[in-house]
Amino acid sequence: MPAKIHKNNIVSTSNKNSSKSKKPGTDQIPVSFSTFDTIGFDTNTIIAWYKLMHLGRRLDEKAALYLKMAKGWSYHAPFAGHDGIQLAIGQIFRSGKDFLFPYYRDLMTCLSAGLTVEEIILNGLSKDADVAGGGRHMSNHFAKPSIRIQNGSSCTGNHCQHAAGTARAIKKYKGDEIAIYSGGESACSEGYFYEAVNGASREKLPVIFVIQNNKYGISVPVEEQTANTRVSDNFIGFANFKIINCDGRDPFDSYRALAEAREYVLSGAGAAMVHADCDRIGSHSNSDNQELYRTKEVIDEMKSRDPLVRFRDLLLKNKLINEQDIKALEEENQSIIFAAADKVEPAPEPLPESYKLYLLPEAIIGYEDISETRYVQDPTAPQLTLREGINLAMIQEFKRNPNTFLWGQDVASVKKQGIFNVPKGMLDEFGNDRIFNGPIAEDYIVGTANGFSRYRDDIRVVIEGAEFADYFWPAMEQLIECSHDFWRTKGQFSPNIVIRLASGGYIQGGLYHSQNLDAIFSHLPGIRVVCPSFADDAIGLMRNAIRSRGVTLYLEPKFLYNYRPTSASEPGEDFIIPFGKAKIRREGTDVTIISYGNAVHLSLQAALVLSNEGISCEVIDLRSLAPWDSKTVFDSVKKTGKAIVAHEHYRTGGLGGEIASTISDELFKYLDAPVCRICSKDTPVGFAKSLESAILLNQNDIILEVQKLVKY
């Protein structure tokens, strides 16, 4: 197999797929369709591979039949024309050792990698016993986490980030596994795919990116996706990155390419890409009709290259098997499928009420546990600011669990160590192997954390999701992914990640340095959101977040980092704040003020002023936004009869609306006045001090609202 050097990487090209670009107006990259080259493979293997390919194809046809019969498999993406590369991926994958990240067209891949026919039909019919996730995910999304075939998303290609993250963990732990990403050519147009390739090549990670190029993204031809129709040519400039092009119809050529890629990544030289030229013989899926955008001539020509037909001809022409025996083999496959179908079809569907299960893994100390360790503030002891409290908690947890890691932007520069110095000293104490910088690619920072935590369950990843919360938007698709991983897999995988974000205003930061995202995060099922306002709570919440499984958004009001009123003496090492447990910061009888973050301090200041007018305010610090402590809030409102929610986020769509609505729904008979919200204005936060002051919530806003409410 000839190889040539292209700048910083190696490009290997199979003799069968030597052309670089697509002919204009045609439907495929031109290749030489000589018979499959089986040199180096014994007869038993060749016949076994044909049997497996035939079984996969007949099973794919069975899926389409279920659709026609309205029995299930409501989403079906046929793999015909991808047979060779998919069979080879499954054969190169070492079950229970390597990590395989398939995509929605990978039925043959998963069958070859170790899923049984029965398990594939269970997934297609969305049965409770589906090993991917019990019918919680779309059909045709095959997985088996117990043997490390990962449960992938429907977000096209975003599992490339997870594969890179898992490969990073493999390298950190000096393992000999590999991570394999499988996807189509159109997913390579996504920005996060470039982030994954850039990161994997720079870090020399043991990951293989397999690109199954069938030249169509649903109806969009490849030439409308990319200038290089052989998509691997887009990645020639990446260092430490080996590119191997092969014929994806041919299982033997594909296997050789994957074996070469595996050898390269296991050497530690870098990551690899195997680009497989394929045909998509069928439509994109059952909801697509390719005859609307492809001519009959093109479709017929493509069918003439059918890998299964060519493989069968090879066996017979080379007399590796006779017609009678091959028919017996094919009939046996049909019997296997019929038997599996008979067993699966009557199997139970998920119970409707089971949707409540596996939303979040249990926390170390959760909502129902109110045994928050009490400690007495010692004013003579050193007082920690909020920033120092977060720093202390992380250092203590990193000492406690050696499988804890931190990365993000600017967290591991020799002297800088965080733009707000929150992780200061951690690089010096724990070294660059556990504390390291990430590229300015927020999606990659979060996505690789998801993948990294797949390597072993005791791993905990703390990331600075962005230098400012405002810059987190590119990572939202990975946050969404994290939010339903545990639910989607029926509890088989939990991304154990703490996402730290410097949040909020009052620093004259303007756009992209002063916004809040707390309401957006709090509305997502499957993640926890906390926001400490005092140093001791910062410590207790961080301990719970790191020790617990699952995803926690840890919002840090940056104005409070060095704000002295947040200071507290260091609590004991057993001090942990439960998720979903608020704290009454000031007791009162006339009105309840519910707040969090910066608004807590504004509320306390307002309550002090109002007390001089004879108005007694009870101030509740939520601390935890998802879940939030309705019990403490309800008990207070029952006592005062009046409630105000004060928060820094916008009024419209803010968390205050949810809290106010819940109070009104549950406590209407206890209320002496409407539930009020006092918030920042419904506008971005301006940079000029006059604009910032006019836009953000302030102490006087709260005072005026309380005065109005008590007179109701």
Image (spheres, rainbow, N blue to C red):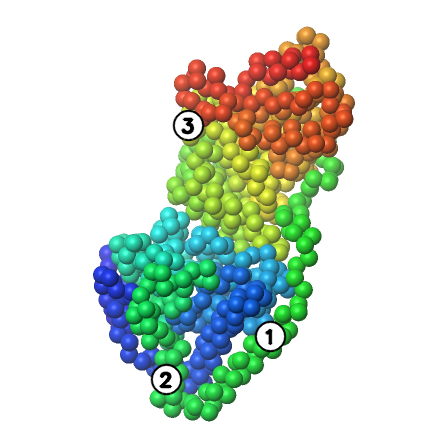
In the rendered structure, the answer to whether residue 313 lies left or right of residue 411 reads left
Residue 431 image position (x, y, % from top left): 47, 44
350 is higher (above) or lower (below) than 302: above
Q: Quote the CA–CA distance across marks 3 and 2.
A: 65 Å
Looking at the rendered image, the quarter that the N terminus falls into is bottom left
- Identify residue type, mark 1: Ala
Q: Secondary structure at mark 2?
A: helix
Q: In the image, is residue 612 above or below residue 593?
A: above
- For mark 2, what is the residue? 313
Q: Is tag 3's residue or tag 2's residue first in the polypeptide sequence?
A: 2
For the residue marked with disc 2, what is the amino acid?
Answer: Asp
Q: CA distance from mark 1 to mark 2?
A: 28 Å
Mark 1, residue position: 340
Q: Is residue 673 left or right of residue 122?
A: right
Is residue 272 shown to the viewer in this render? no
The tag on residue 349 is none
Which residue sits furthest top? 613
Between 413 and 489, which is closer to the camera in this rendering? Answer: 489
Mark 3: few, some, or many residues within 10 Å (few <14, many ≥20)?
Answer: few
Category of crowding for the residue at label 1, using alpha-carbon neighbours closer than 10 angstroms: few (below 14), some (14–19), many (at least 20) = some
Is disc 1 placed on a helix, strand or loop? helix
Q: Give the residue type that dot 3 points to.
A: Leu
Q: How many marks?
A: 3
SS state under label 3: loop
Q: Residue at x 35, y 68 (%)?
A: 279
Tags 1 and 2 in contact by the CB under 8 Å rule?
Answer: no
Residue under label 3, please give it: 511
Query: Residue 375 is drawn in which quadrant?
Result: top right
